[in-house]
């Protein structure tokens, strides 16, 4: 018998009688084995449009908040309902006298009066309302807030009327209510309308338009956390800011900061990069003041890089690495100096093809450039981690435009960096390439998604889970999943249906193929059985063979190991042979180490 261990996945290398394989799928690397790759399991409701940026923030108190941005809107995940709440910047309140301080500005139907700081419906007939003319823009979402008190009967709902009416939800209880109505062509009036014979009071009415941002596929959202603040940028809009635990919507970042494509914290500074006015420039804030952007004041300043192309991003560090298209600079903070930061070019002719491929954690930064993948440490030491391993294979499949859009993310817990990419030209990410930098090994998985990022969840008590599902047996994740553990780091992604999910589902179907073995002198080997060294009985084996290296590999049918021996019995004679093990999706297993092959020489051909 011959034990053939599952070797490293190195598709760029020849696998005949070597120590590598070119055919694995949906596994992760471990020392001496492969691990299962968990499926993406949806958690949230779907966003209204494709997310073009995503971010996880953690407040000083430990509260986790997940943000996402689409072409026109910014959202935050509601940790109770798992729906997406609007947090786009609001325009001014367009309701006049929404506090009903006087009996003015409102048109009152029968049954409605205004007095003592409230609007009162007294047995108001269904359909009767108080209203005022307003200007609405078709397609714009409006946030409507009002307070109901003294409720006795009936109900009230907000309505945008004129043309086709847009009706809100009927409220039949005391409380402050918020909802979002999308105006249509012809809307000219805002109303609070009685539903049924109604008796109640209404107060504190506001109607505010949500900003329509101008992000797109080439002007994506980028987020960064600075203390208790989250800053969101895209090159087409003014930088936005949200204070954790305080803000309910984003607002323009004060201090007149420039528009930029990317934002990153550099120690005690916030830095904007690839500016709308100069793509080769970085501009950092005042020291510990993200509202100070006047160059030369309180350590705020800018740097324009004369060569190396457009700024593509940086690491998150006090002394950052700044990655351009064709150069890499090391920035060094110089306290007390008039220059604030000194910049030294440490690599020329090397940079990031895709700005979204840049991923950093601690001392390590990873990125994709023309033809390969790279790792650079905080001191500037750089390594081509894909050379003669995976780069030729991967970039041979990628179109140039697709290489420029791949997204990188570092696992928040393990020593793995992931790149999601479109290998087939389908227009959507379908493959995730994985590199474990401690083991210096690669793997790959197939997973349709529109973006990956490191995340964490808010944490839930059993009572809190009731808000998600009244039946614990129907929860998407098991009760011991890290998803329900507060602050537990986990890799997340948005699926093609724009729902947020975590890679914590059941195991994906795993396929692991050994390297090819054969006698170059012409000897034929007869295989009689194969034992898959996998800690599960649910797997199948297939044997691939060919008599000449130039011939196509012919595979046997899938063979199920016998229940008595665990071996897959099959007579197969050939000069060159390899073994493929398939572990079905949903199977519980932990390690796949290799195959034990029962084989013997069978003459010459």
Image (cartoon, rainbow, N blue to C red):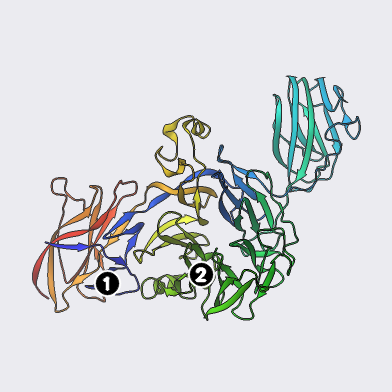
**Percent x, y of residue 239:** 69, 58
For mark 2, does the 10 Å Cα neighbourhood hold few (<14), some (14 to 19), or many (20 or more) residues?
many
- Residue visible at 24% across and 72% down in the picture: 18
For mark 1, does the 10 Å Cα neighbourhood hold few (<14), some (14 to 19), or many (20 or more) residues?
many
- Residue visible at 12% across and 76% down in the picture: 605
Q: Quadrant of residue 254?
A: bottom right
Name the quarter where the N terminus is drawn. Answer: bottom left
Give whichever of 540, 97 is nearer the camera: 97
Separation of marks 2 and 1 at Cα, in angstroms: 26 Å
Give whichever of 416, 49 is nearer the camera: 416
Residue 403 is labelled as 2
Give whichever of 361, 308 is nearer the camera: 361
- Residue visible at 47% across and 55% down in the picture: 448
- Residue visible at 69% across and 55% down in the picture: 240
**Percent x, y of residue 188:** 83, 42
Judged from the image, the secondary structure of the residue bearing numbered disc 1 is: loop
Does the rendering let one see residue 604?
Answer: yes
Q: Is residue 274 above or below residue 55?
A: below
Q: Which residue is mark 1?
A: 15
Give whichever of 288, 411 is nearer the camera: 288
**Percent x, y of residue 232:** 64, 56
Does the rendering let one see residue 557?
Answer: no
**Percent x, y of residue 557:** 23, 57
Q: Is residue 304 above or below residue 533?
A: below
| Earlier residue among tags 2 and 1 | 1
Left or right: 432 as drawn, with respect to 62: left
């Amino acid at each position: 018998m011959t034990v053939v261990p599952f070797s490293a996945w190195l598709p760029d290398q020849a696998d005949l009688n070597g120590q590598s394989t070119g055919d694995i799928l949906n596994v992760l690397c471990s020392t001496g084995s492969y691990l299962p790759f968990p499926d993406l399991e949806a958690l949230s409701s779907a966003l209204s449009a494709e997310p073009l940026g995503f971010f996880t923030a953690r407040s000083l108190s430990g509260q986790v908040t997940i943000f996402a941005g689409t072409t026109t809107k910014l959202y935050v995940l509601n940790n109770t309902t798992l729906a997406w709440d609007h947090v786009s910047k609001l325009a001014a309140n367009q309701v006049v006298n929404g506090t009903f301080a006087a009996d003015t500005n409102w048109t009152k139907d029968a049954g409605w009066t205004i007095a003592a700081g409230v609007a009162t419906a007294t047995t108001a007939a269904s359909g009767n309302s108080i209203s005022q003319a307003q200007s609405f823009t078709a397609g714009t979402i409006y946030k409507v807030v009002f307070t109901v008190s003294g409720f006795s009967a009936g109900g009230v709902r907000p309505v945008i009327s004129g043309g086709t009416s847009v009706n809100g939800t009927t409220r039949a209880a005391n409380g402050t209510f918020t909802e979002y109505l999308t105006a249509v062509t012809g809307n000219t009036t805002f109303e609070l309308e009685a539903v049924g014979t109604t008796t109640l009071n209404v107060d504190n009415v506001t109607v505010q338009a949500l900003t329509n941002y101008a992000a797109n596929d080439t002007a994506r959202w980028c987020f960064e956390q600075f203390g208790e603040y989250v800053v969101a940028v895209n090159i087409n809009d003014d930088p936005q800011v949200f204070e954790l635990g305080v803000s309910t919507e984003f607002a323009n970042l004060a201090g007149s900061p420039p528009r930029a494509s990317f934002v990153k914290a550099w120690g005690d500074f916030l830095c904007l990069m690839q500016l709308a006015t100069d793509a080769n420039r970085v501009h950092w804030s005042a020291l510990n003041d993200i509202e100070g952007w006047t160059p030369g004041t309180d350590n705020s300043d800018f740097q324009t890089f004369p060569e190396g192309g457009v700024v593509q991003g940086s690491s998150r560090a006090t002394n950052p690495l700044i990655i351009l298209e064709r150069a890499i600079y090391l920035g060094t903070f110089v306290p007390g100096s008039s220059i604030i930061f000194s910049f030294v070019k440490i690599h020329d002719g090397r940079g990031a093809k895709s700005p979204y491929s840049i991923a950093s954690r601690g001392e390590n930064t990873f990125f994709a450039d023309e033809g390969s993948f790279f790792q650079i440490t905080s001191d500037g030491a750089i390594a081509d981690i894909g050379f003669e391993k995976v780069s030729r294979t991967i970039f041979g499949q990628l179109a140039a435009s697709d290489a420029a859009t791949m997204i990188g993310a570092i696992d928040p817990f393990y020593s793995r960096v992931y790149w999601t990419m479109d290998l087939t030209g389908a227009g959507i990410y379908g493959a995730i390439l994985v590199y474990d930098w401690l083991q210096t090994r690669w793997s790959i998985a197939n997973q349709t998604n529109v973006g990956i990022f490191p995340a964490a969840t808010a944490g839930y008590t059993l009572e809190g889970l009731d808000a998600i599902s009244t039946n614990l047996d129907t929860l998407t994740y098991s009760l011991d999943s890290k998803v329900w553990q507060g602050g537990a780091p986990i890799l997340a992604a948005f699926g093609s249906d724009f729902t947020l999910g975590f890679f914590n589902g059941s195991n994906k179907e795993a396929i692991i193929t050994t390297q090819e073995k054969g006698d170059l002198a012409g000897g034929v080997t007869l295989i009689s059985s194969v034992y898959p060294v996998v800690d599960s009985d649910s797997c199948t084996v297939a044997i691939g063979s060919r008599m000449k290296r130039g011939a196509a590999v012919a595979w046997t049918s899938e063979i199920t190991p016998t229940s008595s021996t665990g071996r897959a019995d099959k007579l197969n004679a050939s000069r060159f042979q390899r073994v493929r093990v398939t572990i079905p999706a949903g199977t519980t297993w932990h390690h796949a180490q290799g195959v034990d092959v029962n084989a013997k020489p069978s003459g010459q051909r």
